[in-house]
Amino acid sequence: MKSIWFDIKMIFNSPNQGLKKLIAFNIFVFLGLMVGKVILILAGHEEIFSAALEHLTLSSTPIIVLKEPWTVFTYFFIHIELFHLLFNMMFLFWFGIIIQDFIGSERIVKLFIWGGISGAVAYLLLVNSFSYFILKGPTYLNGASAGVFAIVVAAATIKPTYRIHLFFIGDVQIKYVAAFYLIWSFIETTGTNAGGNIAHLGGALMGFIYGFYFQLPQKKNVFVKEEKVFSFVKVAQKRIHESTNEQDNKEVVEEELNQILDKISKSGYDSLSKYEKRRLFKASQKNE
């Protein structure tokens, strides 16, 4: 049991663990809700749990959202079904790990949040714009799907030809996986989970915009360099250790390089200053 708590503490206390922190936080919220639900049901107060959910999930009624604006953020951390949570967390991990090295650990978290907000905006706008949805009455939205879709589409935009292995199918480029789920979500906007699928599309739009930004011409060289950075990191570090310079100088070089690499892992290559980029480039030249 101690080892489990130690692993959990390491995730939340270690830098550059944005993806794992997102997954862990979603799981903890789910477990907390389920424990609370069981306790309240056994105590004969299930209505308290239902009332609490209404104040944490996103209502389709604009007036309620204005009174409870925090639900625009809290709804995408709320799951009340195990398989809903598992599906979202698996997709979050699979696609998040693909682009984490390109946009940085902190930006993964920001993209997830912006995707969730975009999903909320799409949900509120569309559900209140078509009589088909209005006649069905008020609904409530929950789940991380919009944030997850933002990361899925961003990954497919930044690394479209990256391949993942699917059971019974084999290797498939992620752009086709993303396209399939986008089309399916669009088809299901008139289904039983209309609001959720609308939120998927809103999150996907944010993911595409975010990924497209990183593909602009002025950014292309940055990503080429960034891929190169991660390819020669180990070689550069080995070179430093083998240097015949004085011990003091070697420690300074190691410390400086490690700080630059940590910064890349945390915030992406684009966060480096011009001086840091020159130093990193110089380190790489020694190994070419």
Image (tube, grey):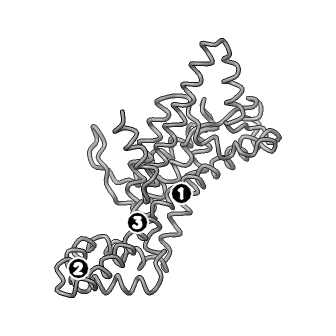
Instruction: Answer with left or right where residue 285 lies relative to residue 137.
Output: left
**SS class, disc 3:** helix
Disc 2 crowd, CA 10 A, few/some/many (<14, 14-19, 20+): some
Q: Which residue is mark 3?
A: 265
Query: Which comes sooner in the sequence, label 2 or label 1?
Result: 1
Q: Position of residue 178 (x, y in %)?
A: 45, 50
Residue type highlighted by circle 1: Gly
**Picture layout, residue 76 above or below residue 81:** below
Residue type highlighted by circle 2: Ile
Residue type highlighted by circle 3: Ser
**Picture layout, residue 111 above or below residue 54:** below
Q: Residue at x 31, y 50 (%)?
A: 164
Please identify, in this view, whether the residue under mark 3 or under mark 2 is nearer the observer: 2
Q: Residue at x 68, y 44 (%)?
A: 123
Disc 1 crowd, CA 10 A, few/some/many (<14, 14-19, 20+): many
Q: Which mark is residue 240?
A: 2
Instruction: Answer with left or right where residue 128 lies relative to residue 140.
Output: right
**SS class, disc 2:** helix
Q: Position of residue 120 (x, y in %)?
A: 66, 46
Q: Which residue is mark 1?
A: 207
Mark pair 1, 3: CA separation: 20 Å
Asked if the residues shown at circle 3 and circle 2 are in contact, with their CB atoms under 8 angstroms apart, the answer is no
